[in-house]
Image (cartoon, rainbow, N blue to C red):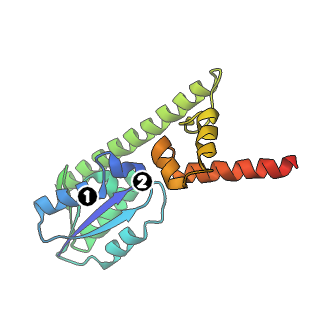
Amino acid sequence: MIIGYARVSTKGQLKDGHSLDVQKQEVLNRYENAHIEFEQFTGTTTERPIFNKIIEELKQGDTLVVSKLDRLARNTVEGIQIVQELFDRGVAVHVLNVGLLENTSMGKFFLTTLLAVAEMERNTIIERTQTGKAIAKTKAGFKEGRPKEYTQTQINMALDLLGENSYTQVAEMTKISKATLTREMRKRKASLVEAV
């Protein structure tokens, strides 16, 4: 049996080419009858319930297929353990952008090298992000989180429109989401109560 596994770490990845649909299509392009399981779980956590269930249920003669090596494991040690366990049970492992991993000395060396490179790349990205954030914090005017999309004046004008219009109508007119309008209206009402 051919079992495909597709995983994304964050909702943001659903938009950037690492989406579940892209991974699914890559597997199906190679194995059109593959059964594919999906999971949205960060690769840094040990808990991947669907992946763990797949690993437990794979049996001799089955093939586990993933689009990329980092979908399989979080680090080199874990990757080697997973693949070795599957090899010991007679399960083949196919990483589409690498190839079919074989239970040979050369296959294991190749796997170890690739996993180490993938782990190094992941760690480098984390280091760059942390360095960039540390530099940004030293600059005047730095604010943590996303920048606000609307000025307070724009929000106040939109809230004033709510007297004669529904939230949906105001959202359409101003392009400010209903959720933002609702949240800001709650804040306004709370500050009025405090002022009384």
Left or right for 175, reference 153: left
Q: Identify the residue at image location x=60%, y=50%.
A: 162
Residue 154 position, x and y percent, is 58, 35
1 or 113: nearer the eye? 1
Q: Is residue 75 visible?
A: yes
Badge 2: few (under 14), some or many (20 or more) residues near its Cα, within 10 Å?
few
Q: Identify the residue at image location x=58%, y=39%.
A: 145
Mark nearer the N terminus (1 vs 2): 2
Left or right for 32, reference 55: left
Q: Mark 2 highlights which residue?
A: 11
Q: Identify the residue at image location x=59%, y=45%.
A: 161
176 or 22: nearer the eye? 176
Question: Looking at the rendered structure, which numbered label has been put on residue 128?
Answer: none
Q: Is residue 6 above or below residue 121?
A: below
Task: Please tell me in which quadrant of the rendered image residue 117 appears.
Answer: top left
Q: Element at badge 2?
A: helix
Task: Please tell me in which quadrant of the rendered image residue 54 appears.
Answer: bottom left
- Amino acid type shown at disc 2: Lys
Alpha-carbon span between mark 1 and mark 2? 13 Å
- Quadrant where the N terminus sits is bottom left
- Amino acid type shown at disc 1: Asp
Q: Is residue 92 above or below residue 172?
A: below
Q: Is residue 102 visible?
A: no
Question: Looking at the rendered structure, which numbered label has been put on residue 21?
Answer: 1
Residue 41 position, x and y percent, is 43, 60
Left or right for 117, reference 93: right
